[in-house]
Image: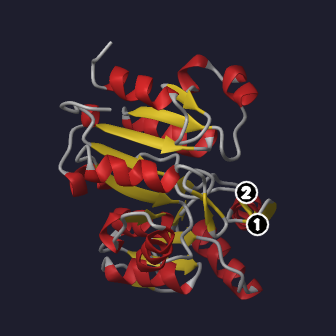
Amino acid sequence: MEGTMSIRGMVFDCDGTLYHGSEPIGHAVGFVNRLVDELGIQVMYYTNRAYRTPEEVSAMLSGMGFPASASQVLTGGTVTAYELQGRTAFCIGSPPLKAALEERGVTLSDNEADFVVVGYTEDIKGSELTTAIQLICHYNAEFVATNQDAYIIENGRRVQENGPLLAAVREAVGREPVIFGKPHQAGIRMARRAMGLEQEQMMLVGDNLETDIQCGISAGIDTVLLLSGVTSRQQVEAAHPEARPTWVAEHLGDPVWDEILNAANGNN
């Protein structure tokens, strides 16, 4: 892990990649700090959770020992807001998601909305579902969502995410939503602009084959799947070759990282 690096930026998933619940995964803190301090690699953090603000995520990461500021954090909410900036939307979602939309100049309305945005919230009302369905079916609003994760793992247990809510709207309107969070490549485009890098200078690291890795693949960047989260090696081996990551590692302390970084930088 020495010498001139052609990989200049890494985008890290959070849950299952850097931490489980409130505890960092072994070696993760040291690995990321080494990238930044010793190798001069820029890092960004990308979580599909739209109900947390970048400030909340960066504070949690910093508290664990990761080098993180709010400007280094992307969420499903901030990415969706970036894609919809300046438009009109009806939003089913958390206060942080609605704030992210408004910060990007999205006008929130329940009347003549260009988009219906669905993000995870614990405070869903039947009237909101009715409004969303009518705007999509009768007023030509486009159906979009922050992410479609069915669940996340917190402290070893499954916790509901946006997928079940999204499924309810999908079933009612008979349409598929546009998903702006992972696996969509929109977040990687934002990260590239923020870091000022080209595709070949970037790498995505995550634990979810269906969201993290497909996000990197769709954006045309190298990917590393960690087996520290929701995806098993058997699932990787069973996947279509075009849907597999560039590399697989057990975790961020896996010795294979020396090989990964050497290969990524043309040192064979």
**In the image, what residue type sits under mark 2?**
Ala
- In which quadrant of the rendered image does the N terminus lie? top left
Amino acid type at circle 1 is Gln
- Name above or below for residue 122 compared with residue 247: below
174 vs 74, nearest the viewer? 74
SS class, disc 2: loop
Marks 1 and 2 close (CB-CB < 8 Å)? yes
Q: Name the element at disc 1.
A: strand
In this rendering, is residue 35 above or below 99?
above
Q: Look at mark 2 in the image and give the residue it sits on.
A: 150
> Which residue is at a point 67% across and 47% down the rendered structure image?
229
Is residue 89 something one can see in this rendering?
yes
Q: Which residue sits furthest right? A: 157
Residue furthest top in the image: 268
Q: Can residue 186 be seen in this view?
A: no
Q: At 30% across and 80% down in the image, what residue appears?
A: 105
Q: Nearer the viewer, residue 134 or 259?
A: 259
Image height of 133 relative to 188, above or below: below
Residue 177: name its quadrant. bottom right
Pointer 1 local density, CA inside 10 Å: few below 14, some 14–19, many at least 20: some
Residue at figure coordinates x 41%, y 69% from the top left: 78
Point out the image quarter for the C terminus. Answer: top left
Real-space CA distance between mark 1 and mark 2, rounded to the nearest whole angstrom:
6 Å
**Considering only order in the chain, which callout, 2 or 1, is on the residue closer to the N terminus?**
2
- Could you say where residue 32 lies in the image, as x and y percent from the top left? 40, 51
Q: Is residue 45 left or right of residue 125?
A: left
Residue 34 in the image, given as x and y percentages of width and height:
35, 49
Q: Name the residue under label 1.
A: 160
Label 2 CA crowd tier, 10 Å (few <14, some 14–19, many 20+): some
In percent of width and height, residue 18 lies at: 54, 55
- Image coords of residue 218 (percent x, y): 44, 36
